Amino acid sequence: MSSGMKYVQIEPLGDIAIIRINRPEALNAMNSDVIAELSRAIEIVGVDDGIKVVIITGSGEKAFCAGADIAFMVNIDPVKAEKYASSAQSVLNKIERMEKPVIAAINGYALGGGCELALVCDIRIAANTAKIGQPEVTIGIPPGWGGTQRLVRIVGPAKAKELVFTGKMITAEEAFQIGLVNKVVKLDEPTAGSDAQVGPAQDQTKRSSDKSETEKTRSSNTPAGSEVAKALNKRLIEDCIQFAKEITKNSINAVKTSKMLINKGMDVDIDAGLRLEIYGWALCFAHDDRQKMMSDFLSKGKK
């Protein structure tokens, strides 16, 4: 799919689309041009009825997105800062509110605005070498692209304050343990679709193996390390595509409705959320695919 954009690429794969931030020389940091092009890319895939699931990732093997452009921010005044943050929040809001499910393929650093970009995605899948964090306080500002609001909704106030107040980066495994990412991908794990995941119950031998694999991938300045990093990134995208296919085989109308109900439900009390759920549930009965899928299910049961 040719979009005519310099910093953002759209790759259609049937009913799945991959959006790549293509500024690897700056670790895919988002300047004003990237923000504008990302907004355009979201509009393009959003209106394409043939696309059911979107995957967002970064070009190269080093970074998903390193966040805001510090070289731009260093000399701007409060008025320009507000405009910059508003434009970034606008596109992130657009991603979060898009009806279609969005998967973040975190292939490296996801820091500051990069972490905030991942937060607006519905599912987050990370390479085991990824580093995630909100380090804004280390350069004199708080998170400004939604980090103080969305992070707390995902990991809770205590852990959100820890990450924001210290500005520290955490590993993909740590992010999995606190519920910040859904899955961690390694080169030596079974293929996507299995139940294998990285978590606190892993034995010491596996931890040592993971550490060794991570160290090899970090040495990306060597030919061997570069090949490992590329293989890991390829595996990450394959796993994200497989995850997307698990979604696309279902009723996309029901999935869209479910996304809306979950997102809206977080901002209202339980009674209002339950009432909203009834409306969404009932409206799906007006959709053609609902009756067909139910009939197919009953037919299978009779065989």
Image: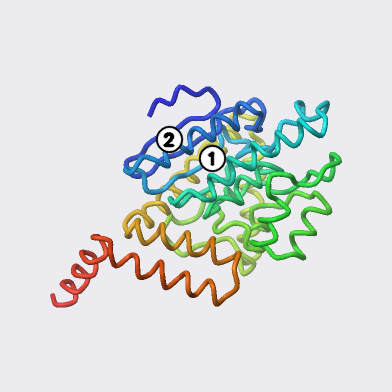
Which residue type does callout 2 highlight?
A: Ile
Q: Indicate whether 70 appears above or below 124.
A: above
Please identify the quarter of the rendering in which residue 91 is found.
top right
Give the amino acid type for the residue marked by disc 1 in the picture: Thr
Element assignment for label 1: strand
Q: In this view, does 124 lie to the left or right of 178?
A: left
In front of the other: 202 or 176 = 176
Identify which residue is drawn at 34% across, 65% down: 283
Q: Which residue lies furthest to the left in this view?
A: 303
- Looking at the image, is mark 1 or mark 2 earlier in the sequence? 2
Q: Which of 33 and 193 is in front in this view?
A: 33
Q: Residues within 10 Å of mark 1 (few under 14, many from 20)?
A: many
The picture places residue 68, in percent across and down from the top left corner, at: 70, 35
Q: Where is residue 241 in the image (x, y as percent from the top left)?
A: 41, 47
The answer to whether 247 is drawn above or below residue 141 in the figure is below
Nearest-to-viewer mark from 1 and 2: 2
The residue carrying mark 2 is: 44
Find numbered disc 2 in the image and state the secondary structure of the residue it sits on: helix
Residue 57 image label: 1
Q: Nearer the viewer, residue 23 or 91?
A: 91
Q: Quadrant of the C terminus?
A: bottom left
Identify the image's colour scheme: rainbow, by chain, secondary structure or one colour.
rainbow
Name the residue: 66% across, 47% down: 115
Res. 300 image quadrant: bottom left
Q: x, y (%) of residue 282?
A: 35, 70
Q: Distance between the residues labelled 1 and 2?
A: 17 Å
